Image: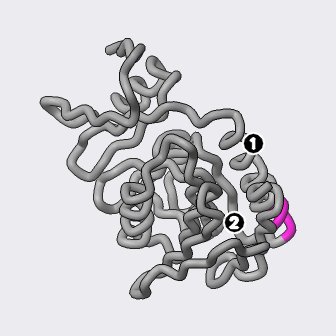
Amino acid sequence: MNLALEGVELPIRLRLEKPLTDLELMRFCTVNEMVRVERDANGELILMSPSGLEGSSWNSELITELNLWARQDGRGKVFDSNGGFTLPDGSMRAPDAAWVSSRRWNSVPREEQKRYGRVSPEFVIELRSESDRLPPLQEKMQLWIANGVELAWLIDPQRKVVEVYRPGQEPEVHEQPTSVQGSGPVEGFELVLERIWN
């Protein structure tokens, strides 16, 4: 199955007659590598364009800082936006950055680690790009929390705002913070936001 998406405004949703299996979804993503693909809990495919260069640079900063911290901390692994997680609700989502403890990661069967593993990260970061609408991103943050994520940050360079999500709590909104501090599973992680805001 191949898609021609020229002139189509993304993100778009595709409802297939029969939801794709994880293996079929991987094949679909391989053939259509010019788009980022996620699957919602109903089996609909969500097709998004790759981020622009500015957003890609910001995401690189996030991944670098999180990975440097994780290497020193030694308790888990970092994943970038190419890593798809199959969540308890059946959706497959790919955050801009994620951290999974070694305990959770080691519980995923080896063969599944090569695909969209059935595991929820403990920590995720979503970075709002120029093409992202805010309400769907905020809904996605709630989806992460509902599926076992313990801490989630939505970083919005357009508003210079960080929204912090935790289970059972209203989101904390930090306006123009110079940094954001990790807690819970990523206690000790600090993300300095100067490179993103500027």
Residue 3 - label: none
**How is the model colour-coded?**
one colour
Which residue is outermost to the left? 17
Q: In this view, does 44 lie above or below 180?
A: above
Q: How far apart are marks 2 and 1 (CA)?
A: 24 Å
Q: Which residue is drawn at 54% across and 70% down?
A: 152
Q: Where is residue 142 in the image (x, y as percent from the top left)?
A: 39, 69
Q: Which is the main secondary structure of the residues drawn in magenta?
A: helix
Asked if labels 1 and 2 touch by Cβ distance under 8 angstroms, the answer is: no
Camera-side residue: 193 or 60?
193
- SS class of the residue under badge 1? helix
Residue 57 - label: 1
Camera-side residue: 93 or 129?
129
The kind of residue tagged 1 is Ser
- SS class of the residue under badge 2? strand
Q: Is residue 7 above or below residue 42?
A: above
Q: Which residue is drawn at 48% across and 28% down?
A: 35
State the residue position of label 2. Answer: 76
The kind of residue tagged 2 is Gly
Q: In this view, does 51 lie above or below 104?
A: above
State the extent of the magenta-drawn residues as a range.
68-72
